[in-house]
């Protein structure tokens, strides 16, 4: 589909802010816990399909397996995001009693004036555990909430708050807390933050509670607003597990996109200031394996309808700052990304600008099929053979690259050869795929 340019004068459309994950570069912590060279891509490339037609692994398109230590990567992400209607990023911020983790891309963004994208922060204030879901299984880093943490945390945000790109709501600095229910004395915490920001000349702050893990009322915690975080607080529609023949025992849920999205469109809250959130897709198989939540028919068309319907709903409200969040720009291990991939290409980005520009192509969710009913191309012998080889070769290349990275003396000689081989193979398979579709 041809790119639809922004509509002239469409200044009243809500601002679209995408959550952004910084875990795409090696850190000492991840090296220690998961092995040398671990990044989010390590999990992504390990994912395997759980049933016929299951879209796994999710592999990146335009930006490749990027490293967020490379400043040009971030600039290209920003250029693409703005081109397709994204107005800002909300970066996850990892702070543990003075210890910051995954902060290098965020600090470099702050120092780089050419990273001209408005941004805000979401404090990811939960324990890091070996199971990836913040349950109490082998805690890797603990949120301790020490007596001095309230003041030290807000001081750590001052360089970001003073930046001209930082997002404000109703003229106030905007901050999200991911787990407000974990704050041991929330009234004291918020009062400390507000008092310090005033005394430092920063003015007022707008503190927003993420509606996660059963929290649905931000006013219970004294916050100024709440933000949806689907699929958190999912009012579970009936799964379709019984209609699927899984390759191995499956303990998770496969749920259709349409009823999930509709449940958020219909949802009402007791608080008056709720920021709506949509997701393009969701499938956390890469992290949780056979315990995954897989959202079936998470297609650009269904996402476009959800986003368009949300925009229409928000435009009817009276809030001066109209904002919709998107989960997420690059949560690849949760199958949740606007960034181009090798299956849908720019589909989710195009759907974003379509919805923002007022294009209303659908009167309901257009994709509701069961697995294998419609996957966008006719199956052929050579296409299937190519897909199988492509899938397993991608996994082998990822493992080989990790092995080479663990041996510095091999990097200079073998990595260039590996990259060249990979690029030649992907070009060959892409050509074969095009020919098989003709």
Image: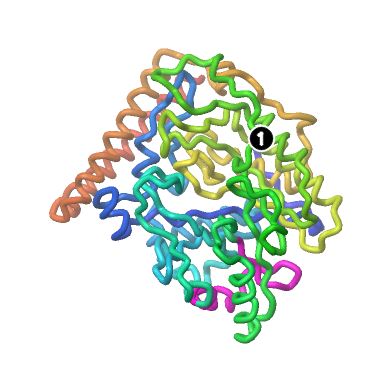
The residue at 53%/30% (across/down) is 294
The residue at 71%/40% (across/down) is 264
Inspect this view and state whether residue 8 appears.
Answer: no
x and y, in percent, of residue 10 in the image: 80, 55
Over which residues does the magenta segment extend? 152-176
Q: Quadrant of residue 42?
A: top left
Q: Is residue 385 above or below residue 71?
A: above
x and y, in percent, of residue 194 in the image: 64, 76
x and y, in percent, of residue 143 in the image: 44, 61
Q: Is residue 89 above or below residue 247?
A: below
Looking at the rendered structure, the secondary structure element under dot 1 is loop
The colour scheme applied to this rendered structure is rainbow
Residue nearest the observer in this picture, 157 or 338: 157
Residue picked out by circle 1: 235
Q: Is residue 257 left or right of residue 400?
A: right
How many numbered dots are placed on residues in this image? 1
The residue at 54%/34% (across/down) is 344
Q: Is residue 214 above or below residue 238?
A: below
């Amino acid at each position: 589909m041809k790119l639809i340019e922004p509509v002239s004068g469409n200044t009243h459309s809500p601002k679209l802010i995408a959550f952004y994950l910084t875990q795409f570069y090696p850190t000492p912590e991840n090296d220690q816990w998961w092995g040398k060279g671990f990044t989010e891509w390590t999990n992504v490339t390990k994912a395997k399909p759980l049933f016929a037609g299951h879209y796994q692994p999710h592999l990146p398109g335009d930006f490749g397996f990027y490293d967020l230590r490379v400043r040009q990567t971030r600039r290209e992400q920003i250029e693409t995001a703005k081109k397709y209607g994204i107005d800002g990023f909300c970066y996850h911020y990892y702070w543990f009693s003075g210890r910051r983790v995954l902060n290098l891309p965020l600090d470099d963004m702050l120092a780089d004036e050419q990273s001209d994208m408005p941004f805000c922060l979401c404090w990811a204030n939960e324990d890091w555990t070996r199971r990836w879901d913040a349950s109490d299984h082998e805690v890797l880093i603990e949120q301790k909430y020490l007596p001095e943490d309230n003041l030290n945390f807000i001081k750590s945000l001052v360089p970001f708050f003073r930046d001209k790109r930082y997002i404000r709501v109703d003229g106030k600095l905007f901050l999200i807390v991911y787990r407000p229910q974990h704050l041991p004395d929330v009234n004291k915490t918020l009062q400390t933050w507000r008092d310090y920001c005033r005394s430092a000349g920063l003015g007022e702050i707008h503190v927003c509670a993420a509606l996660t893990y059963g929290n649905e009322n931000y006013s219970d915690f004294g916050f100024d607003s709440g933000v949806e975080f689907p699929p958190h607080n999912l009012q579970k529609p009936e799964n379709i597990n019984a209609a699927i023949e899984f390759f191995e025992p499956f303990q998770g849920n496969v749920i259709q996109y349409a009823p999930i999205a509709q449940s958020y469109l219909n949802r009402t809250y007791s608080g008056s200031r709720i920021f709506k959130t949509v997701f393009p897709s969701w499938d956390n198989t890469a992290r949780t394996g056979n315990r995954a939540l897989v959202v079936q028919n998470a297609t650009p068309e269904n996402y476009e309808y959800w986003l368009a319907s949300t925009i229409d709903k928000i435009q009817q409200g009276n809030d001066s700052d109209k904002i919709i969040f998107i989960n997420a720009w690059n949560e690849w291990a949760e199958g949740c990304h606007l960034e181009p991939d090798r299956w849908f290409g720019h589909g989710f980005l195009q759907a974003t600008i379509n919805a923002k520009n007022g294009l209303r192509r659908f009167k309901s969710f257009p994709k509701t099929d069961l697995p294998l009913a419609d996957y966008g191309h006719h199956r052929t012998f050579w296409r299937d053979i190519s897909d199988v080889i492509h899938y397993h070769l991608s996994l082998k290349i990822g493992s080989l690259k990790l092995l080479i990275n663990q041996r510095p003396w091999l990097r200079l000689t073998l990595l260039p050869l590996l990259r060249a081989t990979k690029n030649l193979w992907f070009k060959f398979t892409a050509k074969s795929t095009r020919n098989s579709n003709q």
